[in-house]
Amino acid sequence: MEIYVVVKKLIGPINPVGETNEDNRRFENLSELANLMSSLMDDIYDVSKNSDRQEYSLMRAGKFAEGLIEGLKRP
């Protein structure tokens, strides 16, 4: 979880507090976090394409990535 703590410190708070100027800054932080998340999900999606490979290490990573993506889907 060290990476999580570093990212939170780099990006800053994202929850609005009801004060316009502060909430504008926090919205920018939220936007940055969303862009980062989108890029990371693109990377995970690329790995998931390996789930049908014959090589065990590629297939294992691909299936793990597929599971992450499936876990994000809401009913």
Image (cartoon, rainbow, N blue to C red):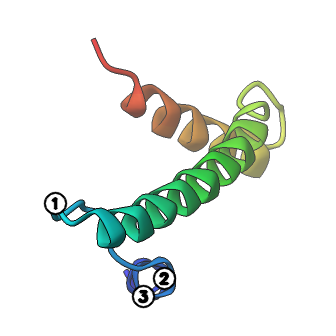
Instruction: Characterize the local packing of mark 3: few (<14), some (14-19) or many (20 or more) Cα atoms within 10 angstroms.
Output: few
Residue type for callout 1? Gly
Residue under label 3, please give it.
Answer: 9
Residue 50, position as x, y percentages in the image: 78, 35
Vertical arrangement, residue 63 with respect to residue 61, above or below: above
Vertical arrangement, residue 8 with respect to residue 32, above or below: below
In this view, the residue farthest toward the right is 54
Residue 73, position as x, y percentages in the image: 40, 23
Marks 1/2: CA–CA distance: 29 Å
User: SS at mark 3?
Assistant: helix
Disc sitting over residue 18 in the figure: 1
Tag in front: 3 or 1: 1
Disc sitting over residue 3 in the figure: 2
Residue type for callout 3? Lys
Q: Residue at x 48, y 82 (%)?
A: 3
Is 22 placed left or right of 30 in the picture? left
Q: Residue at x 42, y 58 (%)?
A: 27
Is 66 placed left or right of 19 in the picture? right
Q: Are marks 2 and 3 in contact (CB under 8 Å)?
A: no
Marks 2/3: CA–CA distance: 10 Å
Q: Earlier in the sequence, mark 1 or mark 2?
A: 2
User: SS at mark 1?
Assistant: loop
Q: 58 or 5, which lies in front?
A: 5
